[in-house]
Amino acid sequence: MHDKQVALVTGGNRGIGNELVKQLALNGFKVILTSRDLEKGQIAAQKLRELDLDVSFVEMDVTNQESIHQAAVTIKEEYGRLDVLINNAGVYLDENKKLLTMDPSILEKTMATNFFGVYNCLQSFLPLMEKRGYGRIINISSEYGAMSEMAERGVGAYKLSKFALNGLTQLVAAEIKGDIKINAADPGWVSSDMGGPSAPRTPKQAAKSILWLATLGPEGPSGGFFRDGKRIDW
């Protein structure tokens, strides 16, 4: 099928996700950029192709199970493999409201993307990795998902979604077999649509701090939580 390793990045049309697509392609991967917005995704992929990078686009909404399933079918048919999956798509919908008095739909929408979106991607894409006995999965988490953060009020929906994502990372690491690694990464506070203009880190800095997890050797960690290459507390 393809000699090149194939990587997929969810929410790859902007911010950290777009930089991850670019850096993977610069490092010799065939990269599939996914986005729920067809037009934005196509434009983002085209811009990277104009830089002579091996990037293709697949429309995928991580809040829609059928959309994820269809994307997995497409990738299986076109490439026959998936070596790296970066679950980057996420939302930050919190306003400064208490968890129990906010509109419950904020928590539901946050969990739908940040937790169930990842869960459903794992269900759909892991079989492609298991078929070859190889895979590297990176879940983009946040320091807000750390247990210690639960003792502080504020951004409760986002915190809970990343806390649950961290738990999912550990549980899946305990279940998978073969040379398949899954880890969570905290990119830090990044200047993007989500992080805002005053954030101190660029998407490029964030991408570099994450991408080493995409090329781990067979002795590399699995089920860990990392920032800038260092293991951090759950």
Image (cartoon, rainbow, N blue to C red):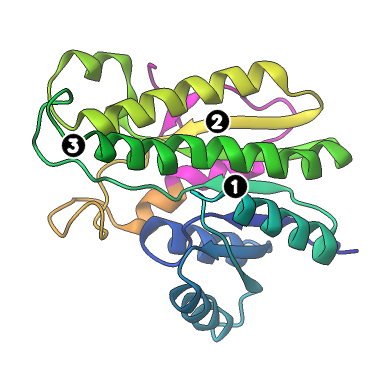
Residue under pointer 3: 103
Along the viewing direction, whichever of 21 and 74 lies nearer the viewer: 74
Q: Which contiguous range is marked in magenta? A: 209-234
Q: Nearer the viewer, mark 3 or mark 2?
A: 3
Residue under pointer 2: 183
Q: Can you say which quadrant of the picture contains the N terminus?
A: bottom right
**In the picture provided, is 195 more to the left or to the right than 168?**
left
Is-magenta flag for residue 211? yes
* Disc nearer the start of the sequence (1/2): 1
Is-magenta flag for residue 9? no
* Disc nearer the start of the sequence (3/2): 3
**In the picture provided, is 156 more to the left or to the right than 50?**
left
Residue 76 screen position, x and y as percent: 81, 57
Q: Please say if 209 is above or below 55.
A: above
For label 2, the crowd category at 10 Å Cα-Cα, with few meaning under 14, some 14 to 19 and many 20 or more, is: many
- Describe the element under mark 3 as helix, strand or loop: loop
Along the viewing direction, whichever of 120 and 49 lies nearer the viewer: 120
Residue under pointer 1: 65
